[in-house]
Structure formats: C-alpha cells, structure tokens
Amino acid sequence: MQRGINTRGIHGGEKSDPVTRALKTPIYASNTFSYSSMEEFFEDAANAYGINPEETTYFYTRTANPTTNALELKLASIIGCKGTLTTSSGMAAITFAILANYQAGTKILASDSVYRSTNQFTSEILPKLGIPYDYLDFRDLNTLEEQLQDNTYSVVHFESPANPTMRCYDIKAICDLVHEYNAESNVTFDNTFASPICQQPLELGVDFEIHSSSKYLNGHGDALGGVIACNDTEILSEFRRQFCETLGQTPSSFNSYLILRGLKTIGLRVKKQSENALTIAKFLEGHQKVTRVYYPGLPSHPQFEIAKKQMTPFGGMLAFELKSQDHITSFLNNKLQLIKLAMDLGDIQTLIEFPYIMTHYDLEYDLKIQTGITEQLLRLSIGIEDIKDLITDLDQALNQI
C-alpha cells in the first residue's frame, strides 16, 4: 500500500533502535565499526554499498553510516524511488551525477538557465577536464530536437522551475526527445525548487533526480546536504563505491540527522509555503510598484500550461520585478521588517535576495540578460509565517519606494 506523503515523511526509513528502543534514529557519530571476526567483517563489507538499501551494513562512515542510511531510506520513500545516495551538499550531488554519467567521446548538454554554481561547473571545470558541453534554451523543443540529432550527449541536465527566473520546461517532452535520439543518454534533473512534494520528475522520464537537501528537504536552514535518486539500485551501489569511497563527498552523520528530522514535516511545510506563495504572487501582481511577477501558479506565467501538467501545488518560490535597480535598492535597504535579505531558499522563514548581484553575481552579463536575470529582478523564498504578516511587510516596504 502506498501511504500518504505525511505518513512517509514520519515513518519512512525509521526503525526503533534494537538495543535502546529509541523511537528516533540517533546520531551515529563513529568513523568506524568493529567486528567479532574476519568472517563478520567480510560479510558486512559485501553489503556496505547498498545494492539492497534495507540490508546495508557498516564498516566505515565514508562508505555508509546508520544515520545516513535511515535518511536515504526516508528520502526514497518520500521521492518514490528504489534508492537514493546522499552527498555533502547539493552541488556535490549535481557535479557527481553529471560526471558519473559522462562517457568519453560524447558531450554534455545543459539548459542555459541553471543554478549559478552549476553553470560555473560546466563553464569552468568541465573545460579543464577536456569535457565538451553545450548550452541551449530548453523552451525551444524544435531546436533541442535538432541539437540531439546532430550530437551525441551522454548527459542532459536541466532544472524546472529554473533558479531564479522561475522558467518552466516540459520535463516529459524533453526526456522523450533525449531518449529517442540518444538512447544511452541519461537525464539528470535538479528538482530543488519544486521539491518532491510538488513535482515527481522520475515519473516523467528523468533518469537521476537531484536535490540540494539543504533547502526544502531539510527546511530549517541549518544543514548542508544533497541527494541523487533513481530507480536502479545497482547503479547507485556503483556510484556509492566511486563517489563515497573514492571521492569522499559523504554527509556528516549530524547533518544527516538534521535533514532526517526536517523531512518529517516536509508535506506540511511545502503545502503551507505553496499556499502562501500563491497568495503573495497574486498580491504582488496587483501592486502598483511591481512591474512583473513570475510564479508557475499564475495564469500570467509564460509556461503556466506546462507547469499545470507537472506541478501540484506550485511551490514556495517566486520572482518579481520592480521598475529599476534604484527601486530595488530603496526597497531592500532597511524597509523590510519580517522578511530577511539572505541567499538561501526552502527555509521555514521567508527570504528575499537580489540575484543580479547576489547569487548570480559572477554569471556573464550576456547570459544573465539571455536568461532573464535582470537588474530589476528579486527572488522570494516563501516561508510558513502567517500570510497577513508577510503581505503587510511587503506592502509597507513597497509603499516606501
């Protein structure tokens, strides 16, 4: 029986401690694990890479840890997949998923509208490794089809909604094209903005779903982490051997514990954040000081029909534009009383940032303009505060411009 998301968030992956009968998974703050014999060691070592996640055993925390294993089982339950691999950060998950799937003699294709650090990875790190890549606007499916016909890509990477412009892409249509023209290609997809509550990309054809678990999965802004999810546990087992054992980008047991704790309320949090975001998007769209609002749940969003097909609800992220950078400076300088100016998202408290000179400060100017990151754009990550308080804060700050 497929249980509801809130039930899975609470119970998925959790087992009462067999010794103490503790109801919550503890923090196993141990680098290594001892054995009564060499036979026991060899038996445990054989299961440490987690082909069957339920039977994972432990000999060194760089490979597997009981707290982290509980987190991975809960993530698999919430995402609705056969297995997950956790990492030390969201960027660790993105970079490894791309590198692990790359095949020599092919190329990497990425959407031109991706997270700034993802862009930095493809444009600065990949060339040093001799790995060719292309950027493309994934909104244009005809051009994408031509590109796939003329090139061999082992990895195609994108995100939707895109950070920070809220552009949405037709996930199923893109995956269908990729797999039609490049049968051996793997689609890696960053689902951080939507979270597994709003969008299930694996069901739409994505091969590897990625999250920065520092964001909505944790939800409290106090732990870094990342996750790669898929439906092939043998591949994940190989990734674990390559990534965790060799490259060492594993999460700490303490961060795993914090994210495990945060996941228990993800269904309630994201539902409330989505409700607040839609109400605020409608408010901003009607405000005289605001020139444009970008939220997938608004009929005015350019990809509203696409978003309706693949998102429900529409998430807690939105962007909006003011008339000029001077207006933005006036708006942000000591006007907001409740909403904090900070470069994060997915937190239970509402945060605002200016992408042009904050999160995407070092993106090339032409790419900023091409992807809609203008000097008038602000990004809002909506929290779970009372909606009247958030609207009052935004209204009083806007009216002071």
Image: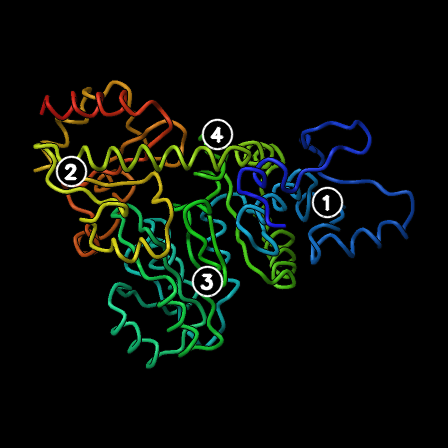
Which labelled disc corresponds to residue 222? Answer: 4
Residue 76 place in picture, x, y as percent:
58, 49
Q: Are discs 3 and 1 less than 8 Å apart at CB?
A: no
- Check disc 1: other Cα within 10 Å, few if <14, some if 14-19, many if 20+: some
Cα gap from disc 2 to disc 1, whole angstroms: 53 Å
Q: Nearer the viewer, mark 2 or mark 1?
A: 2
Q: Nearer the viewer, mark 3 or mark 1?
A: 3
Cα gap from disc 4 to disc 3, whole angstroms: 29 Å
First in sequence: mark 3 vs mark 1 = 1
Circle 1: residue type: Tyr
Residue 242 place in picture, x, y as percent:
61, 58
Residue at 37% x, 70% y: name it: 132
First in sequence: mark 2 vs mark 1 = 1
Secondary structure at badge 2 equals helix
Say whether residue 192 is left or right of residue 259.
left
Q: Mark 1 points at which residue?
A: 60
Secondary structure at badge 1 equals loop
Q: Name the residue under label 2.
A: 285
Secondary structure at badge 4 equals loop
